[in-house]
Amino acid sequence: MFQVPGTARGLEVRRFEVMAPHPIGEVAFDAVEVGDEERLGREGQGLELALATLARFRTSVAAAANGFARRALDESLAHLKSREQFGRALAAQQGLRFDVAEMDARLRAAELLVEEAAELSDRGERAGAEVARAKLFATENASWVCDRAVQHLGGLGVRRGSAVERLFREARALRIYEGTSEVQKLILARELLDR
Ligand SMILES: Cc1cc2nc3c(=O)[nH]c(=O)nc-3n(C[C@H](O)[C@H](O)[C@H](O)COP(=O)(O)OP(=O)(O)OC[C@H]3O[C@@H](n4cnc5c(N)ncnc54)[C@H](O)[C@@H]3O)c2cc1C
């Protein structure tokens, strides 16, 4: 594994846009030269370092997903209490009350999964299943919670620039990067079935 300075000759970054702002691009290498001093870790240790890094980043992506979901739930609660339809606040509608209760319960479960994964990673312990479970559940849940929040705000929910519209778009990519949800399921299944 090497670090390559952004100014290296032969290195080209081609930026592109995704559905929510993200610093992302394709990185092309054309006969880039790197010296020994740019190697990270020992020779042959690259994959090990990459996997260790993934455990940390996957947990932080799961935590970010919980942050998006928390804000979306807050937006829902504020709107349901303030918006009146058919002579009473939306918060009085049982169907919507069931929704926020489920959003809250799922979000708390996701937060506890992240805490468990982070604690093990911080202690330097093997946490393949815990990290995969947290990343899978928190990111899938964030998309679901943000979607419910959009629904609760009705037409305002899809208006470009509203908080829940932005959160809905922001949450989507988390299910793809740092290992897709399917990859997390493969890891979890391997832990359950093959170890
Ligand atoms: C916003 C964003 C930021 C990113 N940041 C980075 C970054 O910083 N560094 C970096 O290196 N990459 C980054 N990526 C790339 C990201 O890691 C990949 O997009 C992701 O790993 C999926 O790979 P892929 O796009 O090639 O999809 P593919 O591998 O082609 O997969 C397509 C679909 O098939 C599913 N699939 C694939 N194999 C299986 C299987 N065996 N079983 C079941 N389903 C399967 C996948 O889960 C996915 O749903 C980023 C992507 C996004 C969207």
Image (tube, helix red, strand yellow):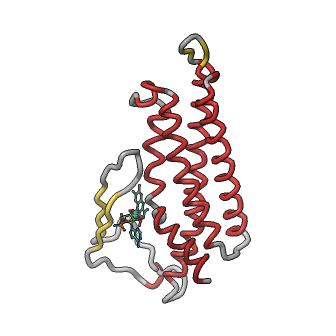
Viewer-side residue, 58 vs 15:
58
Q: Is residue 41 above or below residue 181?
A: below
Viewer-side residue, 60 vs 88:
88
Q: Is residue 166 left or right of residue 133?
A: left
Viewer-side residue, 121 vs 111:
111
Q: Residue furthest bottom?
A: 43
| Residue displayed at 43% across by 43% down | 169
| Residue displayed at 64% across by 53% down | 110
Q: Is residue 144 above or below residue 174?
A: above
Quadrant holding ligand 1?
Answer: bottom left
Percent coordinates x, y for residue 43 in the rendering? 49, 89
Tell me where residue 136 sits by quadrant: bottom right
Percent coordinates x, y for residue 128 in the rendering? 61, 73
Q: Residue furthest front?
A: 94
Q: Residue furthest top?
A: 87
Tell me where residue 36 sits by quadrant: bottom left
Viewer-side residue, 68 vs 4:
68
Work out which quarter of the rendered image holds the C terminus and state it.
bottom right
Percent coordinates x, y for residue 74 in the rendering? 62, 33
Q: How many marks?
A: 0
Q: Is residue 137 above or below residue 27?
A: above
| Residue displayed at 58% across by 66% down | 132
Percent coordinates x, y for residue 167 in the rendering? 49, 40
| Residue displayed at 27% across by 79% down | 31
